[in-house]
Amino acid sequence: MEIEALFNKRMTICKNCPLYKETDIGPVCDDEKWINTDKRISRFPKIGYIRGCGCKLNFKAKNPASHCVIRLW
């Protein structure tokens, strides 16, 4: 898959995720939130929840070797 197509596909998924956060440095995976497999969000760690990775999505989504912290891609 072409890098630009991969990026666009991944960013579409990210923009629909509750961990997506727009910042001054661009979109990030919000590391101030935790999420479970039902996409429920918590502001605090809980059993069965995974913390947002904090990655800059403009870079991570272009890297074919990268993956989403909750395995959406």
Image (spheres, helix red, strand yellow):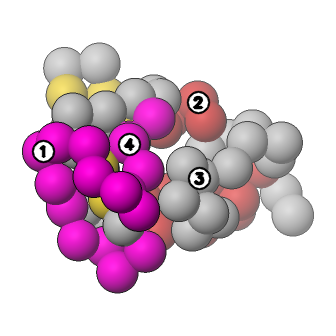
- The residue shown at (16%, 54%) is 42
Q: Which residues are magenta?
A: 37-53
Q: Is residue 28 visible?
A: no
Q: Is residue 5 visible?
A: yes
Mark 4: which amino acid? Arg
- The residue shown at (38%, 42%) is 52
10 Å crowding of disc 1: few (<14), some (14-19), many (20+): few
Check disc 1 and report the residue beneath it: 43
Q: Quadrant of the C terminus?
A: bottom right
- Look at the picture and state if 23 lies above or below 45: above
Q: Secondary structure at mark 2?
A: helix
Mark 1: which amino acid? Arg
Answer with the quarter of the image where residue 5 lies: bottom right
Check disc 2 and report the residue beneath it: 59
- Look at the picture and state if 60 lies above or below 24: below
In three-dimensional space, the C-alpha distance between marks 2 and 3, rounded to whole angstroms, equals 12 Å
Check disc 3 and report the residue beneath it: 68
Nearest the viewer among 31 and 4 is 31
Mark 2: which amino acid? Phe
In terms of secondary structure, what is the magenta stretch mainly?
A: loop
Q: Nearer the viewer, mark 3 or mark 4?
A: 4
